[in-house]
Amino acid sequence: MQLKWIEDLLVLERTRSFSRAAELRHITQSALSRRIRSLEDWVGAELVDRNTYPLALTRAGAAFCETAGQAAELLLDARATLRREASLPGNAIGIAAGHTLSLAFLPAWLKRCRQRFGDFHARVVAANVLDAVVALSEGHCDLMLGYNHPRVPVSLDAERFASLAVGADTLVPVSAPTSRGRPRYGVPDGRSAPMPFLAYTPNTTLGRVLDTVLEARDAHRGLVRCYEADMAMLLLKMATEGHGLAWLPLSTAAEALADGSLVHAGDASWHAELGIFAYRSVISSNPTLLEFWRMLESPGSETPTLVTAAAGDRPTLASAA
């Protein structure tokens, strides 16, 4: 028997839907069904009544869920405590963050947090968003940081995970400049030849957010994908070397925009506003995390927001209460 099978069943009990539960568990519906069957084989009883709509647990399933849920919570809590003690001494928080946030946002954010909260140890793992979500779901970290957008939300069960806005960013089109300081590659206008496009790989959060911008303007036809990467820093490098048009978080592009190696390639109608959210398990018993979270929720907490500077100035972080 595997602990994740119990977690699958608990999510299935709440959602009453194989498709929704599979989405929240970040596996396919067929894989979820196989794991539930494996759990039923191990228990020796049918746990899910598949003949009802919405789906319901059998009497055996309901009884098993109550006991198994308590056991899973105790096991996950014990594992988290042991891992925390083994990896970092004293007050410690394990953090999983997207690659872009871990480089462009996290260092300054942790510095501001320490100024308000006091010193604590942080173990940071940079990962793609899906891996970070899985790490939080399976108890491999205490806190997750990720970009969020109304049309591309982070897929976490709101009953199991609390969330809090801790910052904001803006996805903006940028290009290397011409000798006159104009963008070498501009956003599609329907008249010019298709522009070389430095794209995010499919299924990345920034890529999916950008798709909403391009689809709203029917702009895909005006772009030719010449390069793909899953990290904004890689697109930044290609853009500054003049390989094409890219959409970058302002936090990533700030220095290049300030020193003139990149310029804005489109107006605000081509921008996408991004929320930066922190997520934690509602059953976490890490005292440092819980105190840290209370600090983030307190009225005195500030949400850093990137402000677009005038041409030639350095974009800066402002604070909105």
Image (cartoon, grey):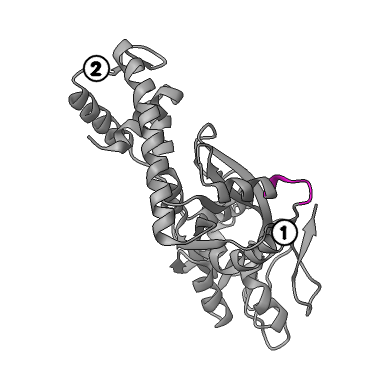
Q: Secondary structure at mark 1?
A: helix
Name which of mark 1 and mark 2 comes first in the sequence: 2
| Residue 174 seen by the camera | yes
Q: Amino acid at mark 2?
A: Glu
- The N terminus sits in image quarter: top left
Comparing 257 with 131, the one in front is 131
**Residue 299 lies in the magenta-colored region:** yes
Q: Residue 58, relative to residue 266: is it above or below? A: above
Q: Nearer the viewer, residue 26 or 273?
A: 26
Residue 49 visible in the current orientation: no
Which residue is labeled 1 in the image? 116
Image location of residue 175, percent across then percent down: 62, 75
Q: Of helix, strand and loop, which one carries label 2?
A: loop
Q: Quadrant of residue 41?
A: top left
Camera-nearest residue between 179 and 100: 100
What is the magenta range?
Answer: 296-300
Q: Residue at x 23, y 24 (%)?
A: 40
Number of other residues with Cα within 10 Å of mark 2, as a class: few under 14, some 14 to 19, many 20 or more: some
Q: CA distance from mark 1 to mark 2?
A: 52 Å
Q: Residue at x 45, y 47 (%)?
A: 136
User: Which mark's residue is nearer the viewer, 1 or 2?
Assistant: 1
Q: Quadrant of residue 182?
A: bottom right
| In the image, residue 303 above or below residue 247 | above
Residue 268 as seen in the image, left or right of residue 12: right
Q: Residues within 10 Å of mark 1 (few under 14, many from 20)?
A: some
Reading the image, the residue beneath label 2 is 46
Q: Position of residue 284 (x, y in %)?
A: 50, 41
Secondary structure that dominates the magenta span:
loop
87 within the magenta span: no
The residue lying at 69 percent from left, 88 percent from top is 179
Determine whether, in the image, residue 212 is placed left or right of residue 83.
Answer: right
Amino acid type indicated by mark 1: Arg
